[in-house]
Amino acid sequence: MKGNVLIVDDDRAMFDLLDFDLGRRGFTVQWRDRAEDAFAKVKEADFDVVLADIHLPGMTGIELCERIAANRPDIPVITITAFGSLDSAIASIRAGAYDFVTKPIDVDILEAALNRAVSHRALREKVKRLKGEAARARRFDDLIGDSPPMKALFSQIVRVAETDISVLITGESGAGKELIARNLHRHSKRRDAPFIPVNCSALPEPLLESELFGHKRGAFTDAKTDRKGLFQEAEKGTLFLDEIGELPMMLQPKLLRAIEERCIRPVGSDAEIAVDVRILAATNIDLESAVEAGKFREDLFYRLNVMQMAAPPLRSRGADILALAGHFIQRFADRFDKRVTGVSENAAQKLLDYAWPGNVRELRNAMERAVALTRFEKIAVDDLPPKIQAYSTDHFFIGGHDPHEFLPMEEVERRYILHVLKAVEGNRTTAARILKLDRKTLYRKLQRYGVQDL
């Protein structure tokens, strides 16, 4: 259907004629003979356009235009004026009408006006939606996505950011844990103070202690001056401890004391220094298992894990993959000064099919490579890394003994479900029976995978 039209005219014969002619041309039509009734209908239902006669009993068409413009500015109004009545036409435009037609009505001219109004409304809605998406992208930096896992994450960030509780961010490598931490800081009351990240696995134990707590002159070789630690650098702000699971056991009680007592002792010092810092931590390992294995202190785990947030793996985010790809393409096209506007249909399908073991970081690197190599305005399959080009969802079992190639159970399930669905040529009822799943469960899983049709 071309659009849903509300006609407001006290002439029933005129409505019957327009209902017949517009219905043949693809419009759905409703009718009200009084402006008051039409306005009440507009407040409770959605229409693509209102077509209103200017001369109505009670409230006039001009007044109806004004009320719709004030209360439902998203719905365009076209007025019907008498032939040669230029003053009425101008008055209706001033009242907020989108356009006008004159009596006797030429249906071809009316159809063109309605089409323009419907297209105008659709364009405004699209621009509004894109502005919302752009605002959200700015609001959450590079955390881009509209999938259910990301919507849930955005909601968590907004609710938790204003508190001062410690947050443990979990998830696979490359899934965006530091971005989550940065957004928690950016939306908190500490936003104007520093955000200090430190990778607990990147420094040897002696240097890490000095890095965190600082040191006094002469505390060790090469300690020629006093130095502030990152706790002090992050004063009034946020300290982000990445790869917290790699923190040496010897430092764990010192970190626990710093968090609980809000004070630190620099290496080589007898005095404690008070600090006011929010702690965010991240890990890609199972800390509860590490606690059970004696590799991580239980008391520190519970102190860090006041609130836990999970960075969803890219493979579970469906069409977010293409939104992120577009975001990275624009960034690298600007950097390389190349005109690259998106991905081809075949390349997009390859991106959606791929399992993304390296998550968003891997997608970013793939798009950087593709933009650098492509000779066209749209990324082609040949521009993608060979691993992505050759990937097939049919290969759901991985051979070999390299632990880095092993897949999470969720990904094995995803590949197997898609393999079965492809084998039965997309028949979801048959697939559900083979998988011993009810249809609703299968549909929910496919929706989570971003699958529409096979």
Image (cartoon, rainbow, N blue to C red):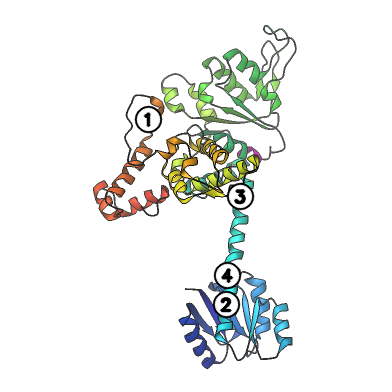
The label nearer to you, 4 versus 3, is 4
Q: Residue under circle 4?
A: 119
Q: If you read the primary sequence from the N terminus, does the residue marked by circle 4 or circle 1 appear first?
A: 4
Return the residue nearer the eye: 351 or 324. 351
Instruction: State the image coordinates of residue 275 (x, y, percent, origin top left).
Output: 69, 26
Q: Residue under circle 2?
A: 114
Residue 37 appears in the rendering: no
Q: Residue under circle 1?
A: 406
Give the side of residue 66 with respect to residue 341, left or right. right
Q: What stretch is highlighted in magenta?
A: 184-192
- Judge the density around disc 2: few (<14), some (14-19), many (≥20) Cα neighbours within 10 Å: many
Q: Distance between the residues labelled 4 and 1?
A: 50 Å
Instruction: State the image coordinates of residue 388 (x, y, percent, origin top left).
Output: 44, 38
Q: Residue at x 62, y 15 (%)?
A: 207
Q: If you read the primary sequence from the N terminus, does the residue marked by circle 4 or circle 2 appear first?
A: 2
Q: Distance between the residues labelled 4 and 2?
A: 8 Å
Q: If you read the primary sequence from the N terminus, does the residue marked by circle 3 or circle 1 appear first?
A: 3
Q: In this view, does 113 lie above or below 11?
A: above
Kind of residue at disc 2 = Leu
Q: Quadrant of residue 76?
A: bottom right
Task: Say which mark, if any, is on residue 136.
Answer: 3
Magenta stretch, overall SS: loop
Kind of residue at disc 1 = Phe
The label nearer to you, 1 versus 2, is 2
Q: How far apart are marks 4 and 3 (CA)?
A: 25 Å
Tag 3–tag 2 contact (CB < 8 Å): no
Q: Is residue 367 above or below residue 102?
A: above
Task: Say which mark, if any, is on residue 372.
Answer: none
